Image (cartoon, rainbow, N blue to C red):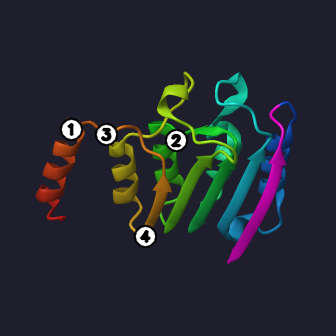
Amino acid sequence: SCTLQSDEEMNPEEDSIPRLASALCAAPLVDSLTALRLRLHYEYTPPEEEHNVAYFRDVLGYALLRLTRLRTLVLDVINRLLALTDDDVLHMRAAWPDIGALSVTYRSEYDVWKPEVMPDGMANPSIHAVVGLALGCKQLRFLHCNVADIVEEDMRRLEARSQAAGIR
């Protein structure tokens, strides 16, 4: 088993992320990597700035999906909103069937982001995608990610699905 932890300062105008992805995938023990903790710290920009959204697939996402032995992944993005789609979550489920702990989060070091300042193109996975991930990854015991707003109809469907499966 191998664990890698990194704090990386990112600049969106540079090629820091592709270089980090290449280095990660070329690392000698990459095939045995079971735990990965990455903190990507971007230069701060106000929420309304156009470079304020980072997309999972661009932030090492596809490189991370090649790490099929992962049991623990902590990806903490600072000073960028991290767009994570249902499709991204579906790829996670397929790539990491034995994941036990998964945390994919974003935050600002200076202010609290409010829904009214979320830019176009910002995506959070639906509750159905997250439940699908949990059902498909049988070892999953810890999950931390931002989720899209849940409407009452979604809650009713989840309750019915849980009751049918005998889950309380």
Q: Determine whether, in the image, residue 68 is placed left or right of residue 93.
A: right
Cα distance in 3D space between marks 1 and 2 = 24 Å
Residue at point 42%, 61% (across, down): 137
Q: Residue 152 carries which label?
A: 1
Residue 56 to residue 94: above or below = above
Cα distance in 3D space between marks 4 and 3 = 25 Å
Residue picked out by circle 2: 88
- Nearer to me, 119 or 31: 119
Q: Which of marks 4 and 2 is nearer the N terminus?
A: 2
- Magenta region includes residue 8: yes
Can you see residue 99?
Answer: no
Kindly indicate whether the residue at mark 3 contacts the one at mark 2 (C-beta within 8 angstroms).
Answer: no
Residue 31 to residue 76: above or below = below
What x and y, as percent, mark residue 42?
A: 77, 43
Category of crowding for the residue at label 1, using alpha-carbon neighbours closer than 10 angstroms: few (below 14), some (14–19), many (at least 20): few
Under tag 3, what secondary structure? Answer: loop
Residue picked out by circle 4: 139
